[in-house]
Image (tube, rainbow, N blue to C red):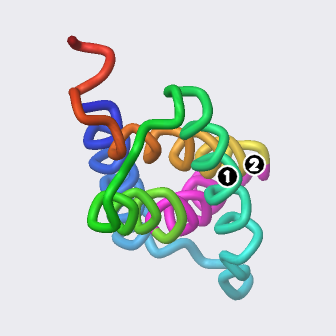
Amino acid sequence: MIALAVALAEIAMILTQRVRKPSGPEKPSPWPYMAVGLGACAIGWLAVGRPGFDYGELCLALVCGVILTAEAGLAAGSLTGRPWAAWTTAGIGGAAAATWLLSEPWPFV
């Protein structure tokens, strides 16, 4: 449930940024945000108790925790103009994506 809510919020942020089309310099590279998302996903996996997973769940967690989070980080940085917002979005999105690996909708059990 947490991962779904965060993924929907990230998609809304990306769409808002794309509709707004800010004028400014060229779009920066998403690679640093991907690295932060992947690291936060690993930390989130440790925080929720290192649950077992199959590869379908792992792919979903990595897509949401790395690719979607990197785009949301770029969008947050573009919308706010503050670099800490982009890094925070990437970190929170990556950590929340680790909850896709849980068998129950934590913490609502």
Q: Tell me what residue is drawn at x 65 percent, y 68 percent.
A: 34
Location of residue 96 in the rendering, given as x and y in whole percent from the top left corner: 46, 39
In which quadrant of the rendered image does the N terminus lie? top left
Residue drawn at the location 44% of the way across and 47% of the way down: 97
The residue carrying mark 1 is: 86
User: In terms of secondary structure, what is the magenta stretch mainly?
Assistant: helix
Residue flagged by tag 1: what amino acid is it?
Answer: Ala
Percent x, y of residue 85: 68, 44
The residue segment tinted magenta is 68-83
Pointers 1 and 2 in contact (C-beta within 8 Å): yes
Q: Using residue 66 as the reference point, say whether residue 35 is left or right of it.
A: right
Secondary element under disc 1, as helix, strand or loop, is helix
| Residue in the picture at 60% in, 78% down | 23
Q: Position of residue 9 (x, y in %)?
A: 34, 44
Furthest residue toward top? 109
The question of residue 91 being in magenta is answered with no
Q: Quadrant of the C terminus?
A: top left
Pick whichever, 44 or 24, lies toward us. Answer: 44
Q: Which residue is mark 2?
A: 82
Disc 1 from disc 2: Cα separation: 7 Å
In the picture provided, is 43 more to the left or to the right than 10? Answer: right
